[in-house]
Image: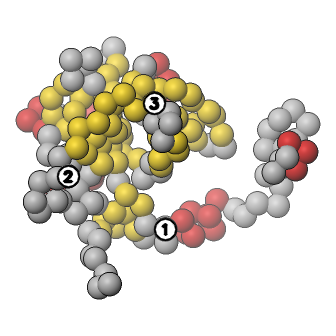
Amino acid sequence: MSEAEHPQGAEGSLDISGGIGAARFRTSMRHYPAGVTIVTLRSGDGPVGFTATSFASLSMTPPLVSFNISDTSSSLSALLDADSVVIHFLGAHQHELAQRFSRPAQHRFSDRALWATLDTGEPVLHGTPLWLHTRIHRLIPIGDHTLVIGLVIEVNDETGHQPAPAPLLYYNGRYHRPTALEQ
């Protein structure tokens, strides 16, 4: 699309006239399965973390990833002040951890046995098959969320262990484990 074809208003904001309503959109998106991640970071007030199903790989060179955070999230102000985050790809065995990080903030890090910290201070959750240490590259406010783009600076990959843990999926308001199809 050329710049002239982008649907933007006079001041560069998106033209959202004619878009569907939030309730209809939310109902539709419940039918798109997503991998479950937990994003953790350090703040002056202690560890911060939240679930994110909006994770995406953006670029191989440079290695960029993204996720979104709601403007109403209790973690937003800490994220806006952070330099880096850890993105944990959850296994199906971690659905209770995903539920914990979907609850109010004071419960997320209450069990110290569930996490440790990197030398740089970010919390790392035990038992996570894969995590990415990511430097925040860009924050883009859009709609009722902020799009976070991160540069991957470290990968911890334990998926080579046999059997590899199945990933945790979120679909239609519930957690799921994928089942391989016959080929």
Colouring style: secondary structure
Q: Which mark is residue 72?
A: none
Give yes or no for contact between labels 1 and 2 (Cβ–Cβ under 8 Å): no
Amino acid at pointer 2: Thr
Viewer-proximal residue among 60 and 84: 60
Residue pictured at 76% horizontal, 60% vertical:
19
Q: CA distance from mark 1 to mark 2?
A: 24 Å
List the residue tagged with mark 2: 159
Question: In terms of secondary structure, where does tag 3 sit?
Answer: strand
The quadrant where residue 127 appears: top left
Please name the residue shown 57% across and 29% down the image. Answer: 139
Going from the N terminus, do you reach mark 3 or mark 1 first?
Answer: 1
The residue furthest bottom is: 182
Percent of width and height locating residue 112:
11, 32
Residue 71 visible in the displayed image: no
The Cα–Cα distance between marks 3 and 1, rounded to whole angstroms, is 26 Å
Q: Secondary structure at mark 1?
A: loop
> What residue lies at 41% left-to-right and 47% top-to-bottom?
52
- Marking on residue 151: 3
Please say whether residue 26 is visible from this viewpoint. yes
Amino acid tagged 3: Leu
141 relative to 170 in the view: left or right: right
Quadrant position of the C terminus in the picture: bottom left
Q: Give the distance between the C-alpha atoms of the residues marked 2 and 3, in whole angstroms.
A: 21 Å
